Image (cartoon, helix red, strand yellow):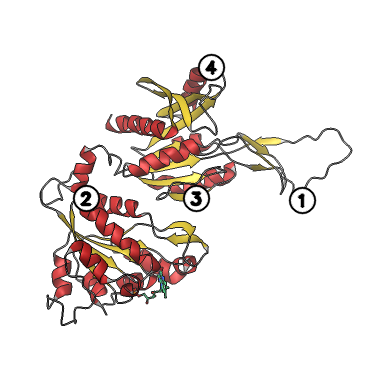
Amino acid sequence: MNKYRVGLGVSGGIAAYKAVEVMRLLQKSGCDVNVAMTRHATEFVQPLTFKALNEGHVIVDDYDPANPDPIAHINFSQNIDLLLIVPATANIIAKFANGVADDFLSSTYLACTAPVMIAPAMNTTMWEQPATQRNIEQLKTDGVHFVEPVSGELACKTVGTGKLEDVDNIVRQALSLLEIGTDGKGNGENHPGGESPLLLLRKEGSLDLAREHVLITVGGTREAIDPVRFISNHSSGKMGFAVAEAARDRGAEVTVVAGATTVEAPAGVKVIKGISAREMFDGVMAELPSATVFVGAAAVADYAPANAANAKIKKEDKDTLTLELKKTPDILSEVSKRRKDGQIVVGFAAETNDVITYAKIKMGKKGLDLVVANDITQSGAGFNTDTNIATLITKNGQVELPLMSKREMADKILDEILKLRKA
Ligand SMILES: Cc1cc2nc3c(=O)[nH]c(=O)nc-3n(C[C@H](O)[C@H](O)[C@H](O)COP(=O)(O)O)c2cc1C
């Protein structure tokens, strides 16, 4: 089998050690990897580490007399199918965006005709800096692909966006780009031998969602009564996050709009907070244009206090307190209304009685392609459990899913989405 050739560029950030794992995973997926490092990257990880695991010469400086190739930046860049930068510092991004070629890696970028994918990692302030964002926009305009950093605890002990994406996800996206290519054909045709590593993974059934962007709402919303109290529900987010994890594992790009949850989001998915129904609505509508599949797994409040108090409501002598509630914006209906060609819309119906009847009514009323109906009174189903029991309803019929883990159920839901896609 001919292999994909990946040029792995490593720049000088704290996450440089993770590039070693990226190289290993690419090798395991059947790629040949050549490594280029910036001088600063060698402060974080030794070239020898890559060399020992790869047998190739690791290029840091093409002026180095020990370098076997006198015009390394040209030969390196012309003999790869993808240039993948992990991690990318703010500095290397700035150099690429502005055509600076003052070291081996930046010269290689300028001399490269292969697709380029960049996985940035840096402190949140550096990431949010207008200069960095301008450079990223410029590179996107130039056709460079990005594996966006995620939110989490950073090396500098702050929490925010700037953490390197999970290495599995970087490799998955790199393989996906190699197979799909910039022409978007996606049949493994870009691979020199026709049998691409991604195609092999796909044959094993593991990356069958590589061309989907799945947008998922997760958890329960909180509707403020006053700054201290809110109306909410028992949703834990476990089912929605299970769908997110399964979609990620099957190669999809995943964005989650999360309300209140009792569990952590899986690594490698983009998470946007949408705590109230209104915030969740806004988050979904902002992301919807780029999604190919929408899954409404959140338990969104139907009604919210009409006039949330600005200060804590005090206990008075009255025995009753009346709250006026008003309807919240209907996310599912709006998603259906705004749906583009090919977008698949999936809803959940958690009911306590006449489950299938109510689910079918919801499907018709909200224009859903698939509804996951569950009777939350059944033991092992519904909120805050690790298992679920459900019926998947589409126009073509029903599939009964007996008691199973939410993760298993997530795959069944995705299987059904794929059937809809093929139909
Ligand atoms: C301990 C330490 C950690 C650093 N981590 C990062 C980082 O994660 N991301 C980043 O953009 N820069 C980081 N820097 C700053 C870069 O190393 C610096 O901008 C350097 O010039 C980058 O060079 P290069 O892009 O040629 O590798 C770090 C610096 C130090 C000393």
Give the labeled residue for mark 1.
Answer: 311
Residue on which disc 2 sits: 29
* Labels 4 and 3: the sequence-earlier one: 3
* Mark number, residue 397: none
C-alpha separation, residue under disc 2 versus residue under disc 1: 57 Å
Q: Quadrant of the C terminus?
A: top left
Q: Earlier in the sequence, mark 1 or mark 4?
A: 1
Measuring from the top left, give residue 296's x and y in whole percent.
47, 36
Ligand 1's image quarter is: bottom left
What is the x, y in percent for residue 208? Answer: 27, 39
- Residue 266: horizontal and vertical position, in percent? 44, 46
Determine whether the residue tagged by mark 1 lies in a helix, strand or loop: loop
What is the spatial separation of the Cα atoms under label 1 and label 3, in whole angstroms?
Answer: 27 Å
Q: CA distance from mark 2 to mark 3?
A: 31 Å
Q: Secondary structure at mark 3?
A: strand
Question: For mark 3, what is the residue?
Answer: 272
Q: Amino acid at mark 1?
A: Ala
Q: Is residue 81 left or right of residue 11?
A: left
